[in-house]
Image (cartoon, rainbow, N blue to C red):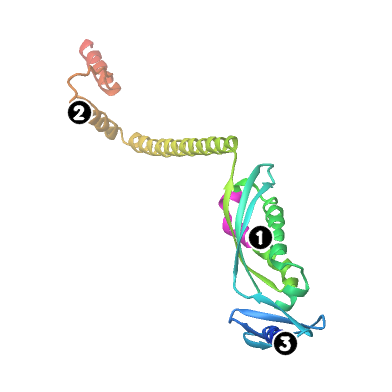
Amino acid sequence: MVLQLGSGALLALLLLMLLASTFRILREYERGVVFQLGRFWQVKGPGLIILIPLVQQMVRVDLRTVVHDVPPQDVITRDNVSVKVNAVLYFRVLDPQKAIIQVENFLAATSQLAQTTLRAVLGKHELDELLAEREKLNSDVQQVLDAQTDAWGIKVANVEIKHVDLNESMIRAIAKQAEAERERRAKVIHAEGELQASEKLMQAAEMLGRQPGAMQLRYMQTLSSIAGDKSSTIVFPLPIELLKGMADLSAKNKT
């Protein structure tokens, strides 16, 4: 009797295991790649999936977007500057069949490919481009990755460069370069101001030179403006016309 009960329990356990391996439930964002006797059969899901025990096997694939943090990479730019760059990668599986059959582990493969691509693409640009043109570099890395992962059924949606770390000496050099650039711009602006002022003074001198009376009026206006400062001693020459008039008058008196 005990032997019969033991055999019945064992049989029930086997039937339960067969049922568990026969029925699978896949969520809305999951797909099942089904193999029959080792050969690819079909992609199923979502919902209830019925498998033939010992004949069919299923591999679950998540179709949601994966956010992967690319660890810091040592990059040597085109102008021979060593920096550390890390990024974040957004990708998802479009073709579950390719993602399972064409590559052993598509998550690890995409991660390694992202690291090598990041170093290769950024190494073609100079440091100034790396710091100022993030959007363009993000697009370049994304296009290269997407083209290479297409054979695995993976779509790389976006790549974002997070940090560009420089050593202390390079930070000081960039600060000196920025300071020199600001000084250069200040000198250029000052020189342009001097040039414009000299052009205006030249135009004013030409206009005053056409009318001698206007020159005298300007001369008197200048004397009036500086006469208000009582603490200043002003030395100014007499107008040439006045001296000439006095000389002519003296000559007439002598005659």
Q: Does the magenta stretch include residue 27?
A: no
Query: Label 1 crowding class (10 Å Cα cut-off): few <14, some 14-19, many 20+?
Result: many
> Disc 1 and disc 2: Cα gap in Å?
72 Å
Residue 95 in view here: no
Residue 47 sits above or below residue 214 on the image = below
Q: Which of 176 and 34 is in front in this view?
A: 34
Picture quarter containing residue 53? bottom right
- Regarding mark 2 in the picture, which secondary structure is present there? helix
Question: Which of the two discs, 3 and 1, labels the residue nearer the N terminus?
Answer: 3
- Residue range corresponding to the magenta coloring: 129-140
Question: Which of the two discs, 3 and 2, labels the residue nearer the N terminus?
Answer: 3
| Apparent side of residue 233 relative to residue 208 in the rendered image (left or right) | left
Picture quarter containing residue 79? top right
Q: Which of marks 3 and 1 is in front?
A: 3
How far across and down, in percent of the image, does residue 140 sit? 65, 61
Marks 3 & 2, CB-CB < 8 Å contact: no
Residue at label 2?
224
Residue 124 sits above or below residue 159 on the image = above
- Regarding mark 3 in the picture, which secondary structure is present there? helix
Residue type of the residue flagged with mark 3: Leu
Residue at label 3?
11
Residue type of the residue flagged with mark 2: Ser
| Apparent side of residue 144 relative to residue 242 in the rendered image (left or right) | right
Query: Label 2 crowding class (10 Å Cα cut-off): few <14, some 14-19, many 20+?
Result: few
Marks 3 & 1, CB-CB < 8 Å contact: no
Q: Where residue 141 is drawn, which disc sits there?
A: 1
